[in-house]
Amino acid sequence: MNALVYRGLRLFFKNKQAVMGAFIAAFILIGLYVFLLGDSLVNQLSALSNPQLVVDTWMLAGVIGIVSASSTLGSASLMIRDRERNVYTDFMISPIQKRKIMLGYFLSTFMVSVIITFSVAIVAELYIVFLSKGAFLTLEQAILLFFSCLFTVFCSSAFMFFVASFFRKIDTFSTMTSIIGPLLGFLTGCYVPIGSLPETAQMVVKYFPLTSGVVLIRRVLTENVFTSDNPEAVRVIKEELGITMGGQHELLFPFVLLAISGIVFLAIALWNIKRFEVKR
């Protein structure tokens, strides 16, 4: 299984197109922020002491959340590509347990996302401190950010593995990923503040599992931003921007939701792949 994980990592990072594709959704968010939403959001938050820093941290938290999902797309496609080239069949008739082979594909997807997500998180923190003039995260906040990213990556990887389990042709999956990447930005409330969405869309965003991960990351990155502002105004703005949402005011709930959702997605994906093999 370790060899399969190493193979997945090597093939992904060797493919420059796949690596660049992992950042497409993040580039879209940055473009929306720079050219369309940035100044408007800053003006709307003018009552705060440092609205620019609030918007910067909100946007960068969204970038981390989106990258955790979009970075799994190229790696998850490896299993489909192997199916199409019958490499997957060769693995299945080998002495290695089928469960370990499938977990090898998932773990390579997970590791790819971990590497890229944590790299982006480090860059985001440096941007906040040195360009946006924010404060460094405390040790406690850094640990919380670490686990927030880790749980988000787990849920994202399981979700993408679940999606990939339904495809047999790499061309079809590639077409679908060009839609899924940007769509995730809307489903997690990263492209547009959640409070500005219609009520029905807000419900979809709030109950989409990956949104919990983005909420956690936002809470950590913005924790040092609102210290000198009016508590009531901060509460309203946090709800509007999706920094806190409903039952997600508590820390435990988002972590539990991400873990359970990830396990469910992974279990269904493994069952679906096994069903596919039985049909063959």
Image: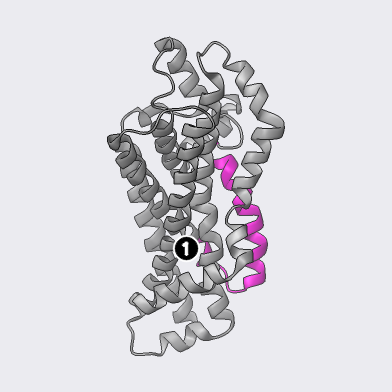
94 left or right of 183?
Answer: left
Image location (x, y in percent) of residue 131: 54, 32
Does the rendering let one see residue 274? no
167 left or right of 263?
Answer: right
Front residue of 224/203: it is 224
**For residue 225, which quarter of the picture?**
top left
**For residue 230, which quarter of the picture?**
top left
57 left or right of 29?
Answer: left
Does the rendering let one see residue 239? yes
Residue found at x 62% / y 40%: 29
Q: Is residue 85 above or below residue 50?
A: below
Q: Amino acid at mark 1?
A: Phe
Image location (x, y in percent) of residue 120: 49, 48
Q: Is residue 43 above or below residue 222?
A: above
> Quadrant of the image for the N terminus?
bottom left
Q: Is residue 265 above or below residue 35?
A: below
Q: Secondary structure at mark 1?
A: helix
Q: Which residue is mark 1?
A: 161
Residue found at x 54% / y 42%: 63
Front residue of 39/165: it is 39
Q: Which residues are magenta?
A: 162-189
Front residue of 266/109: it is 109
Image location (x, y in percent) of residue 231: 40, 12
Residue found at x 39% / y 25%: 224
Q: How many numbered callouts?
A: 1
Please check the rendered image and state whether residue 180 is part of the magenta-colored stretch, yes or no: yes
Type of colouring: one colour
**For residue 39, which quarter of the picture?**
top right
Residue found at x 49% / y 29%: 242
Please check the rendered image and state whether residue 28 is part of the magenta-colored stretch, yes or no: no
Q: Is residue 42 above or below residue 108?
A: above
